[in-house]
Image: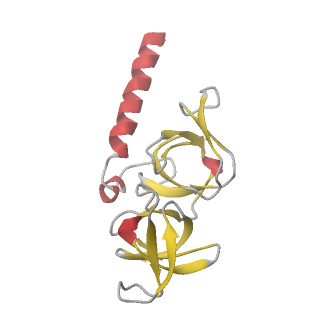
Amino acid sequence: MKTAGMKRRTRAAVSLFALTCAFCVPALAQTADTQTGLPVPRFASLKTEKVNVRGGPSRTHEVTFIFTRAGLPVEITAEADNWRRIRDAEGSEGWVFHSLLSGRRTVLVAPAQPERSFPLYASANADARVVAKLQSSVLASAKNCDGRWCRVSGQGFDGYVEQQKLWGVYPNETID
């Protein structure tokens, strides 16, 4: 029989393990066993406008904050049954029920560089024609990425952005 102290230590060890794994290199993490068989960490997006983020992997844990933007990219850093530990572009973390997440890849344009704009090119080349300027934190769908450039689209725009300026894809990651 587990005592309350043993349960707390077990939860602390699991939390420490999850936190440690959150910083694993994605290529190495792909070899880890997960509930889904998918690599951890990995990116996903929010399915709905309202997503409760909890302090632990169950409905009995308190809601620590609420996302209110469908399509927002999040990084899945751990899995526990039907729950996923996620992190947003600002570094906030918590647990959400798996059905609130989508495999659809979305990105934010340079969220860490507020009040700046970034060129959207007609092709994957810095010498290409600039078709628009995207503000920091603009949400876009990631159509494809070759490790250096991503084709992104959103409301009223479609073009290429340097991959390093996006949050929601890993450096050198390819997306077809």
Residue nearer the viewer, 175 or 14:
175
Vertical placement of 108 versus 129: above or below?
Answer: above
x and y percentages locating residue 79 in the rendered image: 49, 43
x and y percentages locating residue 73 in the rendered image: 53, 57
Quadrant of res 125: bottom left
Vertical placement of 28 versus 97: above or below?
Answer: below
Residue visible at 44% across and 76% down in the picture: 119
Farthest residue to the front: give it: 115
Does the image show residue 137?
Answer: yes
Q: Is residue 174 left or right of residue 68?
A: left
x and y percentages locating residue 120 in the rendered image: 47, 78
Residue visible at 37% across and 50% down in the picture: 32
Q: Is residue 54 left or right of residue 110?
A: right
Does the image show residue 81?
Answer: no
Residue visible at 69% across and 46% down in the picture: 50
Vertical placement of 162 versus 50: above or below?
Answer: below
Residue nearer the viewer, 40 or 128:
128
Q: Is residue 39 left or right of residue 97?
A: left
Quadrant of res 162: bottom left
Residue visible at 50% across and 75% down in the picture: 133
Vertical placement of 126 versus 73: above or below?
Answer: below
Residue nearer the viewer, 61 or 72:
72
x and y percentages locating residue 103 in the rendered image: 57, 61
Number of disc labels:
0
Q: Identify the image's colour scheme: rainbow, by chain, secondary structure or one colour.
A: secondary structure
